[in-house]
Every structure is written in C-alpha cells, then in structure tokens.
Amino acid sequence: MSQWRIIFSEDFSKETRMRLRRDGFAAVEIAEGVARLCTGPSEALYYSNAEIADGEFDDLPWEPPVALEARARMTGLHYGSMGIGFWNHSMILGVSNPVWFIYLKARGRYPLQGFFAQSGTYFSPIDSWGNLKLWKLVSTIAKPLAPINIVSTKPSIPGIDLTEWHTYKVEYLGDNARFTIDGKQVATLPAKPAKTRADAWIDNAVFLPGRDPGRVYRHVTQEIREKTCLLIDWIKIYKPE
C-alpha cells in the first residue's frame, strides 16, 4: 500500500481517548506527553498487565487494509511479554488473530525467546536469544506439540536496543502484513482479514496453548523483581488514500 492517510492520532498531550487496563501489580500513567505502561514487581503466581487499546470484544473499530505506527521504548528488559500492533481481543485457539510486534522472555524452556513480528501463528525474529533452529524443526515435524510457524531463524536486527526510542509500523493489508522499524522493513508475513483493534501492553507472562475445555492460550506468569515500563510517545492509525 503506497499511500496512507492518518485517521486517528494520539500524542498523549492530555488524558487519552484510548482505553486503559490494569491487572495485578501494574499501572498506566499519562504524563508529559507520554503513556507509561508499567508492571511489577510481580510475584510469579499472579498475572500483572498494563495495557492500552481502542476497542473491546464488541467494539473492534478497524478492518484491513489498516496501518498502525507508534514511537516507543522499554525502560529495561524483563521476564514476560510486551507488544504493539493489532489484535482481535480473543485468546481462543484458532480465533486469536494478533498482527503485532511482540517481545517474549521466560526463565524456563520456551520456544520464542526474543523480539518478533507476529501474524497469527507466524513468527519472524527481529532479535532472538533462543534456539530457533531447534524449535523450527519441532514445529515442522510435530505441529500439534508446537502450533507455531517460525518463518525464519535469522534475526532481521540482531542486538536491537529496545530501551532506545524506535518507530514501529504494522501494515495489516488483509492477506499479508508488513512490519517496519525506523523505516526499515523487518518482516512480511501471511495474514487473514478480521476486525481488530490497536493494542499495546506489557505484562509478566508468556503464552502457551491451553489443553483444557476453554481451548485458550494460557498465561505462564513470571516473577518480576523490578518495575519495567513500556513508554509510548505517540500512536497513529492509517487507512489508504
């Protein structure tokens, strides 16, 4: 999509129009033109989450083609997840449709240790500190055990400093999604069209498929010893000209 026009812009210069969510040991603060999404210190057995979004279950305002751009940084690396992009507000297996940048870090064995572009079950590494070659092999030959699609084992920006300010952009085009950081394209992934919302969060959990009647991605919570924040300078939503 060559031409986009801004249809929504949030610079956090005053109280935000977006919806705030806090779970457990977390806080969302809007001050001095920046949204501060913070979590921790958090005990490992409890879910803590700070989140900002522009939709709910019955209020998903966007459909592809649509793009999101945000300027953001983390205050430090932590155990859990962080992300910015689009999501259809469902954790049900086969229904959940994230199209976003996602950071994941766990203490134990976990296939997706790193910072990724994700669309549905497709992951492309931007930076990685896990054994992606092993998990790509596992996901290829044992799909029920690892229902993920690792499209590459080569990070696009190895060593990226997530504590520095970067501009993240997700172009959700319908049957594919493009991801850029500071104007550099880092991934193009398959996608499926669906209603969606803009979403950004930081929490103390990574996610695994549930083996229960709810058939959902379950939180695998991590202990956080110090508070960590996701700072967002601005968010913009685009539609085609």
Image: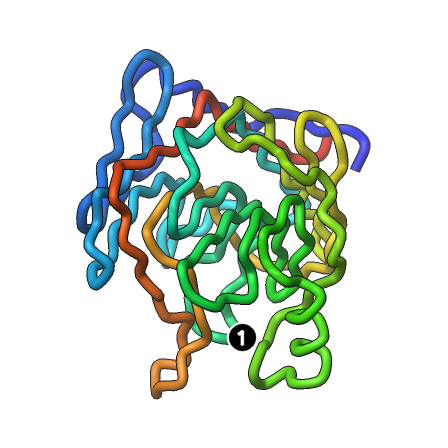
- Residue, disc 1: 94
Q: Which one is nearer the viewer's eye here, 1 or 117? A: 117
Name the residue located 34 percent from the left edge and 33 percent from the top edge: 229
Secondary element at image label 1: loop
Q: Is residue 197 left or right of residue 161?
A: left
Q: Position of residue 61 (x, y in %)?
A: 48, 46
159 or 117, which lies in front? Answer: 159
In the picture, measured across the screen, residue 116 lies left or right of residue 154, that is: left
Q: How is the image coloured?
A: rainbow
Q: Position of residue 142 (x, y in %)?
A: 65, 85
Residue 236, placed above or below residue 110: above
- The amino acid sitting under disc 1 is Gly
Q: Is residue 112 left or right of residue 4?
A: left
Rendered-image quadrant of the C terminus: top right
**How packed is label 1: few (under 14 Cα within 10 Å), some, or many (20 or more)?**
few
- Asked if residue 70 is positioned above or below residue 175 in the image, the reply reads above
Residue drawn 69% across and 54% down?
124
Q: Position of residue 151 (x, y in %)?
A: 74, 61
